[in-house]
Image (cartoon, grey):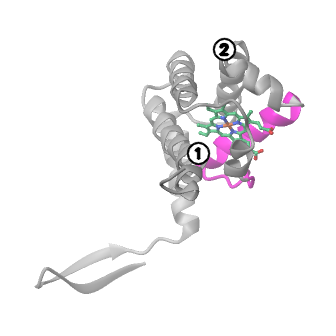
Amino acid sequence: MRSRMPFSVQGVSQSMTYRVRSAEQRRAEIQANAIAMGIDDAFISKLVETFYRRVRQHAKLGPIFHDAVEDWDEHLPKMKDFWSSVATSSGRYSGKPVPVHQKLSGVSEHDFSEWLDLFEQTLHDIAPSPDIVPYFLDRAKRIAESLKLAMFSLPKLREGPGA
Ligand code: HEM
């Protein structure tokens, strides 16, 4: 639907034409954009399988996952749903990553840099188009920042200045 709407910016009256998009239309655009870049279920599956194979072999990250993940046949499909939701707005993932990561022990902020480096390297190795690398990496970095905030900064704030 197209509408004309008057508005005022810093005292200057203007009018603009804007397009009101429903959530459905927005989702369709995100999906079309993802497909155009070559992001589909097959790519997401390969990304998750390749990345976690490397994670499990990683000197620091491997033991963390070894201790926490009981069933990889459950974890990998969950991570495919997660990335499908993040990258294509499919809505397949409905979990809560923050409390899951808050429960982990032995994770440092530096481990997140290692995680992101490995993720970036995996994307470079397997992405069918170069646009895919920043598309996934930007989203991973934003999520990593919010996980780090919840895991490292918020607990310190709660403890207060004298802690
Ligand atoms: C140092 C960095 C990280 C470590 C060590 C780590 C470790 C883990 C582990 C061990 C699990 C499984 C926990 C369990 O099954 O009980 C997990 C789950 C998960 N991780 Fe991470 N992670 C890291 C960073 C990230 C980042 C950057 C993202 C997103 C971009 C992410 C997304 C997820 C999601 C979605 C789950 C599933 C949560 C659920 O059960 O619903 N992780 N992570």
Magenta-colored stretch includes residue 81: yes
SS for dot 1: helix
Magenta-colored stretch includes residue 156: no
Please state which of residues 108 and 7 is positioned toward the viewer in this rendering: 108
Q: Position of residue 89 (x, y in %)?
A: 61, 53
Magenta region, main secondary structure: helix
Q: Mark 1 is on which residue type?
A: Leu
Please state which of residues 21 and 142 is positioned toward the viewer in this rendering: 142
Q: Which residue is mark 2?
A: 58
Vertical comparison of 55 with 140: above or below: above
Q: Position of residue 5 (x, y in %)?
A: 28, 85
The region drawn magenta spans: 72-95
Q: Residue at x 75, y 43 (%)?
A: 103
**Can you say which quadrant of the picture contains the N terminus?**
bottom left
Where residue 52 is drawn, which disc sits there? Answer: none
Taking the image as shown, residue 117 lies to the left or right of residue 2, namely right
SS for dot 2: loop
Q: How many marks?
A: 2
> Is ligand 1 less than 8 Å from the beta carbon at label 1?
yes
Please state which of residues 118 and 66 is positioned toward the viewer in this rendering: 66
Q: Position of residue 21 (x, y in %)?
A: 47, 71
Q: Which residue is mark 1?
A: 147
Whichever of callouts 1 and 2 sits on the residue coming sooner in the sequence is: 2
